[in-house]
Image (cartoon, rainbow, N blue to C red):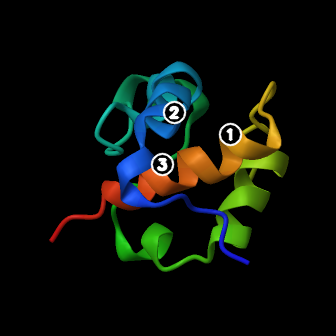
Amino acid sequence: MALAQPPEDLGPGRAVFMSKCKVCHGSTGEGNPAVARALKTTQPVLYAETVQGKSDADLKKIIAMGSGKMKPVAGMGDSDFGSVIAFVRTLKQP
């Protein structure tokens, strides 16, 4: 079962992304260089194939459990995961 919502309902996902993800990943998904330097890491570009090629379930697992230096995102309900994943999918460049 897909977690992502249809494109017409991206407002909630955008809101979650902007409140919980933007600080590290930037508003366009390109990453925040200052955060990457502080953590001594690199951040994947969210519209890159390495991210966009992951399944919704894999993205949910990364968000919920963290990955590398990324900590789990706290305070997300079940519907938030699908909403934010749907929004991240819109960051994919044509």
For disc 3, the neighbor class at 10 Å (few under 14, some 14 to 19, many from 20) is: few
Q: Which residue is mark 2?
A: 12
Q: Are marks 2 and 1 in contact (CB under 8 Å)?
A: yes
Name the amino acid type tagged 2: Pro
- Which comes before the other along the chain, label 3 or label 2? 2
Q: Which mark is residue 80?
A: 1
Residue 34, percent across and down? 40, 23
Residue 74, percent across and down? 80, 28
Q: Residue at x 34, y 67 (%)?
A: 48
Q: Residue at x 59, y 31 (%)?
A: 39
Name the image quarter holding the C terminus: bottom left
- Which comes before the other along the chain, label 1 or label 3? 3
**Left or right of 2 in this view: 16:** left
Q: Is residue 79 above or below residue 49?
A: above
Q: Is residue 35 visible?
A: yes
Q: Nearer the viewer, residue 91 or 4?
A: 4
Q: Real-space Cα distance between discs 2 and 1?
A: 8 Å
Give the image quarter of residue 84. top right
Query: In the structure shown, which secondary structural element does the residue marked by tag 3 occupy?
Result: loop
Q: Residue at x 65, y 62 (%)?
A: 59
Q: Is residue 69 visible?
A: no
Give the image quarter of residue 92. bottom left
Q: Which mark is residue 69?
A: none
Q: Is residue 43 above or below residue 22?
A: below
Q: Nearer the viewer, residue 26 or 92?
A: 92
Query: In the structure shown, which secondary structural element does the residue marked by tag 1 occupy?
Result: helix
Q: Is residue 12 above or below residue 89?
A: above
Q: Real-space Cα distance between discs 3 and 2?
A: 27 Å
**Left or right of 43 in this view: 68:** right
